[in-house]
Image (spheres, rainbow, N blue to C red):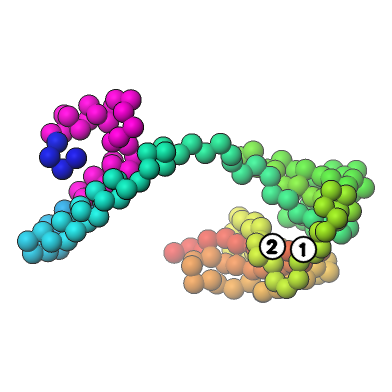
Amino acid sequence: MRDQSVRRYLDELASAAPAPGGGAVAALHAAQAAALVGEVGGVPDGRFVQAVDAAAVVRCSSTPHTEERVHVGAQLAVVGIVVEDMARSLAFYRRLGLDIPVQADSEPHVEVSLPGGLKLAFDTSETIRSFDPSWAPPAGSPRMALAFGCDAPAEVDKLYGDLVAAGYEGHKKPWDAFWGMRYAIVHDPDGNGVDLFCPTPA
């Protein structure tokens, strides 16, 4: 690739040949970026450029062609929550703005469509054990959380206060987070972390 003309390189890239492929394109961009860094930073003799260019070429030549074009055939579509008491859990999430019909309280499985096509699914522990008898509730702190954006920083405080007053567990009171948001954390009836947030004015 180093000794090719631009025209020859583009012609081969547009052909059906397995190489050059995505890795070669990435390598070329890496070398160009390194050259600009060397120019701006005054790196002597282009040593930094040569090192990055050599590493990029080795990466291209050692990468199997089958890895250069990756087609992902799956996308995140559903987030599932296992609940002990469907009615109590749905009541909590209704307070966060989810439109869930009351008749769903007695169902073993409930799905709620969210903006963008994602779905939030609720299953009772009995439903999960019907096909996975070994399932058991996790112990300790949750490893994932849902996060709900609020319209204004004051809404974070109000919603947190309303949920705690309704008997739900407040894990962290509202605070001004260093990443530029008003933030609070509550737990849903099954102990899952639910974050409340809103960007604060600069």
| 183 in relation to 65, above or below | below
Q: Name the residue under label 2.
A: 194
Per the image, label 2 sits on a secondary structure element best described as: strand
Quadrant location of residue 144? bottom right
Q: Mark 1 points at which residue?
A: 188
Callout 1 amino acid: Asp
The percent position of residue 20, horizontal first and vertical second, equals 28, 36
| Magenta segment includes 83 | no
Query: In what quadrant of the picture does the C terminus appear?
Result: bottom left
Asked if the residue at tag 1 contacts the one at tag 2, i.e. Cβ–Cβ closer than 8 Å, the answer is: yes
Query: In what quadrant of the picture does the N terminus appear?
Result: top left
Q: How far apart are marks 2 and 1 (CA)?
A: 7 Å
Picture disc at residue 98: none
The percent position of residue 114, horizontal first and vertical second, equals 68, 43
Give, as a single range, the part of the protein colored magenta: 5-32
The percent position of residue 25, horizontal first and vertical second, equals 28, 41
Per the image, label 1 sits on a secondary structure element best described as: loop
Callout 2 amino acid: Val
The percent position of residue 167, horizontal first and vertical second, equals 83, 69
- Is residue 40 among the parts visible in the rendering? no
**Could you tell me which residue is drawn at 88 percent across and 49 percent down?**
130
- Is residue 167 among the parts visible in the rendering? yes
Q: Is the magenta stretch mostly helix, strand or loop?
A: helix
Quadrant location of residue 77? top right
